[in-house]
Amino acid sequence: MTPVAPVALEVEDVSVRFGGIVALDSVSLSVSAGQIVGVIGPNGAGKTTLFDVISGARTPDGGVVRMDGAVVTDRSAVWRARHGMRRTFQHRQLFGALSVEDNLLVAQEWEGKSGGIVLQMLGVPWGRTRAAQRRARAEAMLEVCGLGEIRHRPAGSLPIGQAQLVELARAVVDGPRILLLDEPSSGLGPAEQDLLSRSIRRIQRDGSCGILLIEHDVGFVMDHCDQVVVLNVGTRIAGGSPEEVQQDPLVRSAYLG
């Protein structure tokens, strides 16, 4: 019997209201480790609001968010990030003055396990060991995301496509449990989209991280996702395999038609 992957993320009956406007109305979904789930829907469907709730940027008016079975609805975005949730943004948020490689190294500094630069300058072995581990992780992700040749370039000098790949590498360099990707293919050319696809699939194959993505490119979602959730005006109108979603008459009428 094939073992069932643990559920990394659960969203149960989440609702958000802005005054009299219902942004999300009792939306539910789940993402297991090693699974890719896509969220699609027209503009104004509530996709970004859903990501804000999941990542801790917004507290819902109702419903529950769980990470690895534990309720985190009232936990901050920082707490969630430090416990394994990572989010990329449609508008890149890189450290522009730092090199590509340094962006990946800085992303690991929150752990506070290297002993800092003082221990490294004093030659304390523990500090050197942790620094070596961080560099090894960064090296691995540079290779996975095809960024080795531009590792020393300032991140702020990169075109949109390469910047998107750097943000992905930075998000996963320390092995998250949950990865939220906001429009990951936006602005990518064919070669960069191919690199993105291969990178996401390699992350998935590792089996420890659940991936939830928002994407306007329906073809990208159908090609990459195990499950697809469709939102329309804040309501979940469908969910299932890509094949099931594409054949759903309500989805075709509201979005795909």
Image: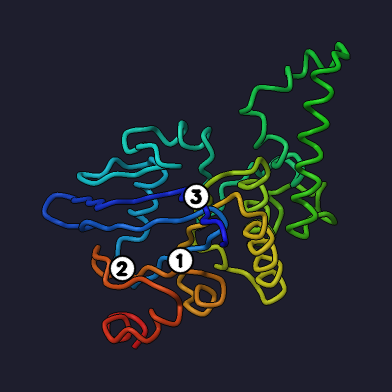
The outermost residue toward the top is 122
Cβ atoms under marks 2 and 1 closer than 8 Å: no
Circle 1 packing at 10 Å, graded few (<14), some (14-19), many (20+), is: many
**Mark drawn on residue 38:** 1
Task: Tell me the quarter of the image containing the C terminus.
Answer: bottom left
From this view, report whether residue 94 is shown above or below residue 115.
Answer: below
In percent of width and height, residue 1 lies at: 56, 62
Check if mark 2's residue and mark 3's residue have beta carbons within 8 Å: no
Residue ID for mark 3 = 6
Q: CA distance from mark 2 to mark 1?
A: 11 Å
Query: Which amino acid does the dot numbered 3 rest on?
Result: Pro
Q: Residue at x 42, y 70 (%)?
A: 228
Q: What is the CA distance from the residue labelled 3 to the residue labelled 1?
A: 18 Å
**Type of amino acid under label 2:** Leu
Is 144 located above or below residue 122 in the figure? Answer: below
Task: Give the structural element (helix, strand or loop) at label 1.
Answer: strand
Closer-to-camera residue (91/133): 133
Query: In the image, residue 225 lies at what x, y percent?
Result: 52, 69
Q: What secondary structure is marked by label 3?
A: loop
Disc 3 crowd rating (10 Å Cα; few below 14, some 14-19, many 20+) is some
Look at mark 2 in the image and give the residue it sits on: 231
Q: Regarding mark 2 in the picture, which secondary structure is present there?
A: strand
Q: Position of residue 207 (x, y in %)?
A: 62, 54
For the residue marked with disc 1, what is the amino acid?
Answer: Gly
Number of numbered tags placed on the structure image? 3
Choose the circle earlier in sequence order: 2 or 1.
Answer: 1
57 vs 254: above or below: above
**Which mark is first along the chain, 3 or 2?**
3
